Image (cartoon, rainbow, N blue to C red):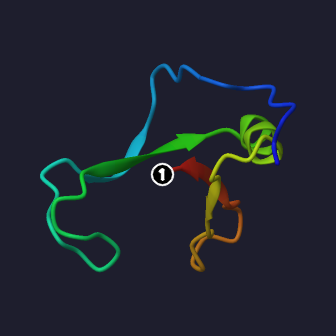
C-alpha cells in the first residue's frame, strides 16, 4: 500500500510529549496495561508522514482562542 515511503524511521529531538500513560492505567481511550504517549510534530513533517501512511492525528484548536491552529501529533 505505502511502497514508496520517504520516512522509515524518524528521530524527534526536544519533543513535547502529550497524553503520557507510562504506567498503563486504564483510561477512557486506553486499555489496562497499554503504555503509550503522544508527540507533537510540525505541520510539514505531519503531511510527509501522513503521505507515507503514518497515523498522524490532529488536536482541535481551543474554542476560547480564535488565533490557535490545530496541532499535529503522533500517538
Instruction: Look at the picture and state if 18 lies above or below 14.
Output: below
Instruction: Look at the picture and state if 16 lies above or below 72.
Output: above
In the image shown, does 10 or 68 lie closer to the viewer? 10
Q: Which residue is at 48% across, 51% downward?
A: 75
Give the left or right position of residue 35, taking residue 40 as reference: left
Give the left or right position of residue 24, taking residue 48 as reference: left
Instruction: Give percent across and percent down for residue 74.
Output: 54, 47
Q: Which residue is at 17% across, 71% downward?
A: 26
Numbered disc total: 1
Mark 1 highlights which residue? 75
Q: Which residue is at 62% across, 59% downward?
A: 57
Instruction: Give percent across and percent down for residue 6.
Output: 81, 26
Quarter residue 64 falls in: bottom right
Instruction: Give percent across and percent down for residue 36.
Output: 31, 50
Q: Which residue is at 17% across, 57% downward?
A: 24
Instruction: Give percent across and percent down for residue 18.
Output: 38, 50
In the image shown, does 2 or 51 lie closer to the viewer? 2
Quarter residue 51 falls in: top right
In the image shown, does 23 or 60 lie closer to the viewer? 23
Give the left or right position of residue 6, taking residue 19 as reference: right
Instruction: Look at the picture and state if 35 lies above or below 41.
Output: below
Helix, strand or loop at disc 1?
loop
Q: Residues within 10 Å of mark 1 (few under 14, many from 20)?
A: some
Amino acid at each position: 500500500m505505502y511502497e514508496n515511503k520517504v520516512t522509515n524511521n524518524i528521530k524527534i529531538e526536544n519533543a513535547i510529549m502529550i497524553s503520557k500513560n507510562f504506567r498503563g492505567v486504564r483510561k477512557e481511550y486506553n486499555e489496562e496495561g497499554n503504555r503509550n504517549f503522544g508527540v507533537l510534530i510540525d505541520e510539514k513533517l505531519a503531511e510527509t508522514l501522513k503521505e507515507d501512511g503514518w497515523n498522524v492525528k490532529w488536536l482541535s484548536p481551543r474554542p476560547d482562542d480564535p488565533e490557535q491552529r490545530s496541532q499535529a501529533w503522533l500517538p
